[in-house]
Every structure is written in structure tokens, then in C-alpha cells.
Image (spheres, rainbow, N blue to C red):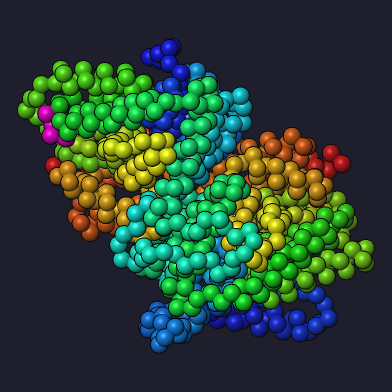
Amino acid sequence: MMDKTQKYIGWACTYTPLPLIEASGFTPYRLLPTTQAPDRSGHKLHDNLCPHIKKILDRALDNDLPPLAGIVFVNSCDAMHRLADAWNQVRPHDNTILIDLPIAPPVLQGPGALSTGPIAPPVLQGPGALSTGPIANDEKSVDFLSQEFSKLSQTLAEWSGETPTKAATQEGLSHYHEIYNLLDEIKNHHIKGTLNKGGAFMQDLYNQAATQSSTQTLESLKKCLASFQETPSLHKGIPLFLFGNVLPDPEAFSLFESCGAYIVADNLCTGFRQFAAYDKIPPGLNNDQDVFAFLARSLLMRTPCARTFDPQKPLYIADQLLAEARSYGVRGAIGHTVKFCDPYLARLPIIREVFKKAKMPLLLLEGDCTLRSMGQHRTRIEAFVEMLG
Amino acid sequence: MISQYFDSLISGIEAKIKEDPKAFHPRKKYTLEVARLGKRLYAREGPIASPMLQGPGALPTGPIALCGVTTPFDLLNAMGVTSCFVEFIGALLASSGTVAPFLEKAEHSGYASDSCGYHRAVLGASQEGLMPHPDFLIATSCPCSGGLATMENLAHHYKKDLFLLHIPQDLSKKNVDYLARQIMEMETFVTRHTGRPLDPDRLLKVIEKTNQARELMVEIYHLAQHIPSPNSGKELGNFAIVMALLLGTDAAIDVTRAYRDEFAARLHAGSSGVPQERLRLMWIQNRIQFKNSIIPDLEKNYQASVIVDELNSMTWDPIDPHDPYVGFAERAISIPFNGGVERRVQHLKKLAQDYKIDGAINPCHWGCRQGTGARGLIEEGLKEIGVPVLNLEVDCVDTRNYAEGQLKTRLGAFFEMLHSRH
């Protein structure tokens, strides 16, 4: 249910800095690809584009949206950029902004890493030469994204007519940090099996936190924890780790459970990863620049989407996902990706190889953001669970 | 195997040029330079038994880099590095008719058939040991996410260092400076891997050649706008994107001068690229890389000539030899595939107006989320200025699902409609 007193800002990519939106007096509203709107986006874009994007555009074409004061897009992949392009055409009167996003996280590590010493000066200098010398390699992505966030903050201020105060910014950060902590606590109960409410309940919490104000989210999360009574685990499903991109429908998790699986934890764009950047709020964020730099660093450093990678550790995502799966003590993993998602499609072969070498059973599924596509996978999920049983 | 293919191609073209040394032979010279680049890239064909560096700074065959499309190749040429964007290899494999087994190899390894054929081709070729063996790799965030992912896979496959250039979206000073700094770091990265620092005098000469080739390209494009056009459907196919690999070399000047002189001579003689040119067409995105009869068919049956390709235009200013990194950065940011689709549509509209285009063909390369993803938006944009677009459904690299008969039926209907507007 939409709160008519809120001023919503739409967002679609988990690299969006939610506290900045909140600090400007808006409520970040995730444009989830769940809709009954007819499929019409293919003629604006192309049928072989990511269904996540197409479903969101279908919502825009069908006006299946709350009133939005603006939309924040992130240039995280080709499909997201095309969404911004198409949105501007189908809803030309909406306020929109596109944030550019570096590819690499800020920390360079591992064999072959460039030395962190100063970069050699340019060979040629003189009139018109760059005014500032090269910045340290491990900071340039943070520096770039900080400036993008500064631009976002100014744009949000224009949209709201008010410049965010320092107190509002601190409150935005602190709210999302608290949301992180509360979700983490509930998630840990779910992982232990003592929550006994199933994956659909967790996904519903994530969806609420992504679409309502932080105040409302905090209230409902606190209520959830206040009513929580630790009980012995009742679930009997095979414990599995779920990773991939977009799977926002809580019913999908019920479907997994009906197949005999228990999704212990996830690494999805629509799951806990949405809030993973707000795990720590360091002291001493004294001015806007500190806040922008902090958010830039946190978002680039948090568990990455497949589109973000460290060139010093190519395809490290496979090892990262395996380590994460192992950390939950699961018996296997399910990778669920939406069709036509280039960032994941190109990394799945190495993920499959690494999991196979590590003898971690893996089931790869492809979907289109509808339950119908998940339903088609029921037999495969049941067979996978049976094999692990 | 591939090296022999290039040897044979080179000797064949050289013989033909020798037969009539006074002719300009622009396309032959272009193909010759492509083949020579291919030969250099595959000079170390087969497993490398010895380390790249033997003795202080010595390289047995010269360093080789696999790159993204918007890498400053003239800077690499100045540093003695033989390089190409990886899609160039995908196109070569397709044009030589050898691509299918590599696509199949990639698909059997788990790379989805829904993804870009250029990238599947090079991933398959790398697994079969038939890609040039790189000493290092340079990825660029533009033009596409799929290309970046391919570069990451290749770096992992070859266990070679990867440098990443993040190409920002617009030409603001902040963005240009940011990319210029990355290119400086790239230069340092290359030096570390080759043991050869950049020679400033050599860079100055290379930039002079880049600018010379640029001026000739501007002249070529200007001449091609003439009615009727001296250009014909195949002559400038893949031209600008491949010329980027040769920038800073004598080869780039030789090829561009040959085109300029040939087009000028045709105009002087009152001849056109396609006899009795009736329809002037624009080709969007990239060409179909394998052998096909579409272009000759539309020239012969409809007097329709593809006189401009989307990328055959000059979007960048001459590089300032005293501040080259800024020029390299501006050039990379300026390509039509970068930034929002609105900018791309404006670029296409300008081309359509400059060349007085009757219609446009978009192959809608299957699996290209960057280019094809904006298909409908481009179509609507060009419609605003009265230029109809024919959207095809072709994988420009993969011959396996290519149905030329169906395409020709659609082309026929499109040209009938265009003729009826005349």
C-alpha cells in the first residue's frame, strides 16, 4: 500500500545511494519488475533485452507506478542504460538522472597488482596540460563516483526545492545502517532456522525495505523482532545458497520450499545485497564530500553484482560466491539469473567450473521475473533437491 | 593455420596491386593492412614456449595486447605494441568462414547462445588456442557490458594482467580529465609490461600521423556525401572502426589517401559508386561480417547504395600533440556508441541529413544489448525526420541461423516502399 504523504523517488539498481535520497526528503521506491502490465517494452527496446528492464519499462508504459518525484538510474550495465533512455522517451516529463558507475572496486590486491607508488607523470606537458596530477589508482573510482553522488545530491535538492541539511544526511545514513543491522539480525535467525517463517517472509521484508520509507521499515522490522521468539528449527528442507540477480517475488521462495529446498541465504540484487553497503557508518563524516566518498566506497566494495570486477583478480566472483556458499554450511547452491543478463551470462561458465572443482552441487536456472518461469523449473529443482537428500 | 591464411591473403592482394600500380585500390589497400595486422597479431601462433622477455627489454615478436574498442590504439602503436579490439578477431573469423566451430566451442563451455556472437567467437577461439596470445589486456567500459565480461574471461584464460579503462558518459571537463588520467596510467601499465618507456618524440610523430589520417577521413566522408555518391555499399564497410587500429601509422595515411583520391577521381569523372544510384542508405551499428549477397543484391536490383555507416563519421577533434591524453580521452568519449541513446539518435539524424538518406538498415545484431537494445528508440528518432528504418534480426557473426531468403523478402518490401516515396 502506497503512503500518499510520501514523495517517492524511483530507483532500479542496487548501486543507488538510498540515504542520499532520504536525506533530500524523498522516499526511495524500488521499481520492482513485478507487474501485470502487458508486454509492450520489446518494441521500444528489443525482445532480447533483460526482462528486469523490460518489466520496469512495462510498468512505466502502463502507468503501473505510484506518483514519482523523479527516478534515479545507474549506468551499471547496458540494459540499465537502455532503461534510462527508454524511460526518458516514454515519460518525457519525469525528472530523471543517470549516475555513471565505475567498473572496478577501489582496492587493488593480489598477484600482478600495480604498485601503489606514484604514477609516472605524462610524457608531454605544457599549455593545456591536466591541472592535477594522476590520482592514486585505488582511489580514482571512489573519487569519480563521489562526484556523481554530489551531482545526484544537487539534482535531488533541485527536485525537492531544499538543500539537505547535515542532520538529514546523518539521519539518512543512520536509518539505513539501522535497517542493515535489523535485517541482518532477522536474516541470522533465518539462517539458523529459528525464525521459522520461510524465505518468502524474508523476501517480503526486503521488498518492503526497498519500497517504503526508512521510518516505516524500521518500525516494521522492530515489530518483527519484538514479536520474535526463538524456537527450534522446524524446517526440513535441504539447506541451499541462492545467488544471481533479480528474484523479487516472495512466492518464488515458497516454490523452492515446496520442492524440498530451504534457501538459507541469498546473494541477489533483490535480496540482502540491496542494503549491504550500510553495514558500517564511520565516525567523522563531517561534510558532504566525506559522505559521498563513504557511500561511493561502500557501494563499490560491498558484495558485487557480476558487472563490477577487480581487473587484478579476473573472475574472482566465482571464488567469492563459493566462499559465501561454504560460509553458510549449505549442501548446494542455486544460481538464478534473468535471461539476457550479459554480466552474469559471461561469468556463469567459470562459476560452474569453480563449484564443480570444489564439489559444491550447483543448479543454474534462468528466469524472466515471472513466477511462470520459476514454475517451469519445478521439476529440475525437485530433482536437484532429491539428489542432495 | 591463421598465420598462413594471412600470408596467402597478403600475397594475393599485393599481386593484384602490382598488376595495376597506377590505380588507387583503396579497398585492396585497406584489406592488405588488415591482413598485415592479422599476421602481426598471429606472429606467435601456437603455444609460447619461452617467456615474453628474453634479456633486458627484448621481445621475440613484439608485445601483443588484446583490447576493448575504445582503447587509444595510436598510443599503443607509439609504444610498439601490436593490438586490436577483440571483436576485430571475431569479425575476421566470420569473414574467413571459420567461425562456426568457435561459436559451438563457446556454447558447449556454457556461454549462452543469447550473447553477442563476436564475443562467443573469441571466447571459443581462445579455448581452441586460435586467438592471438596476448602479453596483457586492456578492457574498456565502452561500448558494452558484454565486451567487458569477455575481456575479464580472456584475462583469466591467458593468466595475463588486465588494465581497465572506464569511459565516462559525456565530454564534461571532469570526465575528460578522469579518462586522461586513466590513459596515463595505462601508459605506465604498458611500460611495465614491455620494458619500453614511451619515447616522446615517437609519440609526437604518431600523433602527427593520426591527425593526418583524420583529415583524410574527413575529406572521404565529405566526398561520400555527394549526389550521386562515389561510395558504394562494401567499400567503406567497417572502415572507421578498423582504421582506429591503424591510427598513428603510415598504413592509415596510405589507406585513407587511397580512398580520398579514388572518390575524388570518381567525382571528377562524373561516376558514382553504384551506377544509376536511386536510393541512398545508411547502415546502423555494424556490418554482417560473413560472406553474404545482401549489398550486391540491393545495388543490382534496387539501385540502392549504402553510402554511410553509423561509425563512419568524425566525432573528435585533432589530437593536440602537446596534450595528447586529453585528446585521446575526448576521442574515446565521443564515439556514437557511448552515452545515452538521445545523443546517438542525434548523430544518426545528422548523418541522415548530411548524406540525404532515403532509408536506414539496422541489422540489430543479435545479443547486442548496447546497440540493438535501443532499436525501437532509434527507429522512432529517425522517423521524426522522415527516414524509415528496416530492423533486421541478424547475428552479424554467426552464420548458423542466417536465412538470407527471408531477409531478402523483407529488404524487397522495404525498397518497394522507399521507391514509392520517390
Residue at the spot x=33%, y=26% of the render? Answer: A171
Image coords of residue A333 (percent x, y): 24, 45
In the rendered image of this protein, does residue B46 appear above or below residue A109? below
Q: Quadrant of residue B373?
A: top right
| Residue found 16% across the figure and 38% down from its top | A238
Does the stretch in magenta take in B379?
A: no
Is residue B380 or residue A114 the one in the foreground? Answer: A114
**Position in image of residue B312 (x %, y %):** 71, 57
Quadrant location of residue A298? Answer: top left
Q: How many numbered markers are drawn?
A: 0
Is A192 covered by the magenta stretch? yes
Q: Is residue A94 above or below residue B49?
A: above
Q: Quadrant of residue A86?
A: top right
Q: Nearer the viewer, residue B312 or B189?
A: B189
Region of the chain picked out in magenta, as a range: A190-194
In which quadrant is the C terminus of chain B drawn? Answer: top right
Q: Is residue A4 visible?
A: yes
